[in-house]
Every structure is written in structure tokens, then in C-alpha cells.
């Protein structure tokens, strides 16, 4: 066996200048005061946003009030449409049927035809 020695690779340090390296960045410890301030600020902003969402100009309470008002107005509109339809029907009957005018005159004004006799009956008290 022959012993062949391999040439040794010498390190760079021995040959010359030291290579350039980045300096290690040491994190600056954040103070507890700053951390606490950030937490308080975040809590405050969150509370302001929640309160605005609940009672702001376009918040939940205003939205609920607007929906309730819409339901009330819609119900009122439906009632007015129903009354309007009844009045139109009454106008149509008064224009088309003379008997309707006659029955209205008898009930509202107490009128009778010629030759009719009216009997007024009163209840007796016990």
C-alpha cells in the first residue's frame, strides 16, 4: 500500500484579511410601558368602533328603528289601500244601483216611502 498524502487545504484566515461579515442585530427589548400603551390604545379603538356600530348614525339601534318605522308605515299604507278600495266599491254601487241610494236614505235620514207606516217599538224594562 502506498501512502499518498493529500495536500492540505489551509484556512482562509491564515492567508490574509478576515472576510466581511454582517453585524448581528440584537433586538431591542420593548419596554412594558410601550407594550401596555399599545394594548390600551387597541382596546380603546375597539370600544369606540363597537359603540359606533351599536348607536352610531348608521348603527344597529338606528337600523332597528328604521325597520320598525318601515313596518309601521307599510301597515298604515295597507290599511289606507283597503279603505280606499272599500270607498271605491261604495262609489261604484251608489252610481250603478239606485236601491243603494234608497237604503242609505232610509237608514241615515230615516226617510220612508209614501204609504208606508213606521212602527217604533220600545223595549220594556223589567
Image (cartoon, rainbow, N blue to C red):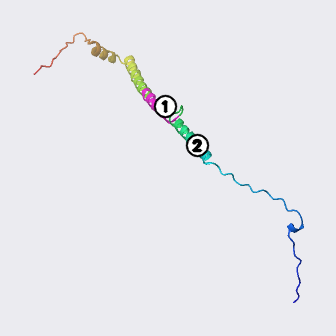
Residue 29 as seen in the image, left or right of residue 106 = right
Residue 105, located in which quarter of the rendered image? top left
Residue 66 got which mark?
1
Work out whether residue 15 or residue 97 is closer to the camera in this orientation and state it.
15
What residue is disc 2 on? 42
Question: Which residue is rendered at x = 89% and y = 65% of the image?
Answer: 16
> With respect to residue 99, does 76 lie above or below?
below
Q: What element carries label 1?
A: helix
Q: Is mark 2 on a helix, strand or loop?
A: helix
Residue 46, located in which quarter of the rendered image? top right
Residue 1 in picture, x, y percent from top left: 87, 90
Residue 32 in picture, x, y percent from top left: 60, 48
- Is 75 included in the stretch rendered in magenta? yes
- Is 88 included in the stretch rendered in magenta? no
> With respect to residue 29, does 126 lie above or below?
above
Question: Which residue is rendered at x = 55% and y = 37% of the image?
Answer: 48
Residue 106 in picture, x, y percent from top left: 27, 14
Residue 12 as seen in the image, left or right of residue 93 = right
For label 2, count other residues whose C-alpha is less than 10 Å away and answer few (under 14), some (14-19) or many (20+).
few
The magenta region covers 59-76
Quarter holding the C terminus is top left
> With respect to residue 14, does 100 lie above or below?
above
Residue 8 in picture, x, y percent from top left: 87, 76
Work out whether residue 14 or residue 115 is closer to the camera in this orientation and state it.
14
Of the residues under marks 2 and 1, which one precedes in the sequence? 2
Work out whether residue 42 or residue 28 is closer to the camera in this orientation and state it.
28
Amino acid at each position: 500500500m502506498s501512502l499518498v498524502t493529500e495536500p492540505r487545504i489551509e484556512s482562509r484566515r491564515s492567508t490574509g484579511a478576515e472576510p466581511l461579515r454582517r453585524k448581528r442585530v440584537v433586538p431591542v427589548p420593548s419596554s412594558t410601558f410601550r407594550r401596555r400603551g399599545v394594548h390600551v390604545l387597541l382596546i380603546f379603538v375597539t370600544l369606540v368602533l363597537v359603540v359606533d356600530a351599536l348607536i352610531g348614525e348608521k348603527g344597529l339601534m338606528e337600523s332597528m328603528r328604521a325597520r320598525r318605522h318601515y313596518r309601521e308605515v307599510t301597515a298604515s299604507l295597507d290599511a289606507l289601500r283597503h279603505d280606499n278600495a272599500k270607498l271605491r266599491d261604495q262609489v261604484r254601487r251608489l252610481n250603478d244601483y239606485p236601491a243603494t241610494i234608497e237604503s242609505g236614505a232610509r237608514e241615515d235620514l230615516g226617510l220612508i216611502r209614501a204609504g208606508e207606516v213606521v212602527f217604533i217599538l220600545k223595549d220594556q224594562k223589567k
